[in-house]
Amino acid sequence: MRLPSNNQIYLGEEDPDATSCSVHVTQRKRVRSNCGDTLQYEVQLFIHDTSTAYILKPLTTITTDSLGEAELIFNTEEALDEYIRSSGLPYGTGCLPYHRIQWMVTDSCGSISICEQRIDLYDCSALIADIPSFTFTAHIPSGCQLTLFAEDFFIGGLDDCSLQDQFLFGFQEHMYIPDTTIICPEAFGVELSWKIWIADEGRDLNCDGQIDWNEKRKIELPFQIVFTEAGNCECGMPVDSIITGQITTIVGNEGIKDVYVSLLRPGHVFPTYVTAQDGIYSFQVNLSGEETTILPEKNDRHKNGVSTLDLVKIQKHLLGMEPFNAPYQYIAADANFSQNVSAIDLIELRKLILGIYTELPWQKSWRFVAKEYVFPDTLETWTYASAITFTDMLPASADFYGIKIGDVNGTAQPNFTQLLPRESLPPFELKTDQQFYFAGDIINVPIRISSDQKLTGFQFTLDAAGMEILNIIPGQLDVSEEHFAIYNDKMAISWFDENTIDVSAEEVLFTLQLRAIKSGNIAQALSINSEITEAEIYLANDETFLPFLNVHDPHVESDLKIISCTPNPWKDETMINFYLPESNQVNFTLTDISGREIFSTTSYLKKGYHQQLLKSSDFQGTGILFLRISTSNMLEITKLIVAE
């Protein structure tokens, strides 16, 4: 991706021909043809997923290489639409639907394949600000009080999307503080290093109709400043006190990394402290009798520690089966920051688990409570000390507990280095049977459990390569639309039953309904992973396992097997489905009934299921023929009937 040559960052925002908030895009796709060596393709664009199509690449003919593969490409600088050709594709605001790209490819047999993808374009380039080469001077007046405005230290800059009058300026990175009142600076008459933060227009990530400070892209602008004094302000109080504290989890009392701790005092600017893995912070302060506040904040990795098991806990609480036993659970369960726990919180957290949300729209990912705060007798309380304030005495304790929103059972990892690989969970088998299909087929894939179990719930990402996921049909489990989200050929799913139900290995849990985009088989197409939603399955007593999908084929053991030839008899072409138990050089040979060889080809193939297309145009011969598939140590023969 690249900025158009007419972008305002090159031409200047005053130029009437300058564009903004758009970018040129080039994309490539590698495809393989099963019929002929010529392909035709076209690429269409649907801006913000509307119904109007723009041609990014007109109908183009290309030739495949020796492997039957070709590279498709589009470049918006070559689009038919004049505006797109000059200015590229527009950014989204954060709330508009993604752009939809549609690739349409036709092979030599007239078969059409369509691939759709969504792209989200947004401003990821930081604005460019001029760094002052001089020192600012601030004169404290006779009243010993001066208000400074962050925007006064900005001397110019450019952005590829926002105009300068849309910039915001603040003295804190994580809080919008546009001005500060100086009563007693750190020193008079010497150069001090200060900084401000400059934010661009940003994007409305939570779709609430406004863009707050934390939804903007910011850069840090350093500068030098000298304070001078008009009168005797008696500001020479020494900095002789150190305040320190630790921020930890409730479960395990582990230090929390990357907490931004601010020390706030009227007329003073203190650097923000970012905690390391021990969760400890410290500030040097003087005790001047002014009100001083310590405020911790952390807003990252919203999904950390949030799983379907937390939904089970919240549901059991709402139904009175297992009420919460600590006030921290209420705070963690309040996903929409409504100051109560309801079914709405379940909906919001499930959207986070399924990848519909990348972060909770109503609040930050962590909340903090002073460790010394004593909750009232009622567990359900929404008033608590999220900051520590003091004046002329340091607080007895400056420690905080961190509460990860959505993590009711306390499994969030407080720092990155402690994340456990998913493979550390014991494996658990889900299974289905092998099926072969052609492009356009709609097939049902029943999913079963490997043994009789008491099942509480599960979550995972289902990958269906080369297929379109249409629906889930309930079986033993009442799976409905609220339990899954579809992303082209991937599905994120989260289901639970708070009563922990008995499921049988003989019965179907649920059935996947799929449409094949290209010919293939279930063993190659379907898999379970953690790409969107972490793969976990929960049995009785909250036992957690790592699910995987086993595709069973009763025809395949440890030998080379020809599974099917479809169609047979045939005239123009047939598809050979076979299983190769080990990677090897594979020979395909056709002979007539007299044993005369009429066709042969060789390929190196990896272990697994494969397909080989045979076309009558590749050889001369009709009637009864024999296909030999062989390797260095295996041989399988099948009979074919080719009609005239």
Image (cartoon, grey):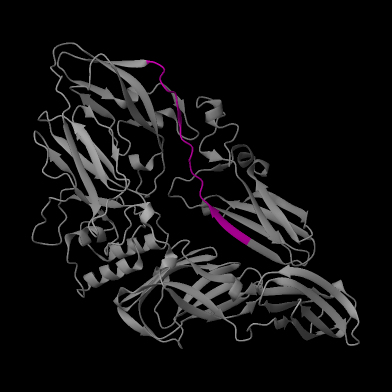
Task: Classify residue 274 as left or right of residue 634.
Answer: left
Residue 124 is one of the magenta-drawn residues: yes
Quarter occupied by the C terminus? bottom right
Image x and y of residue 428, in percent: 44, 76
Task: Classify residue 582 as left or right of residue 405.
Answer: right
Residue 539 is one of the magenta-drawn residues: no
The image shows residue 275, relative to residue 612, as above or below, that is above
Q: Which residues are magenta?
A: 115-134
The image shows residue 59, relative to residue 527, as above or below, that is above
Image x and y of residue 173, in percent: 33, 36
Q: Secondary structure of the magenta portion, mostly? A: loop
Residue 211 visible, this orientation: no
Residue furthest to the top = 230
Q: Say which of 117 and 248 sits in front.
A: 248
Image quadrant of residue 579? Answer: bottom right
Which residue is rendered at x = 27% and y = 62% of the image? 410
Q: Say which of 555 and 68 sits in front.
A: 555
Image x and y of residue 287, in percent: 12, 30
Residue 282 visible, this orientation: yes
The image shows residue 478, relative to residue 389, as above or below, that is below
Image x and y of residue 100, in percent: 56, 54
Which residue is rendered at x = 36% and y = 56% of the image? 418
Which residue is rendered at x = 54% and y = 63% of the image? 488
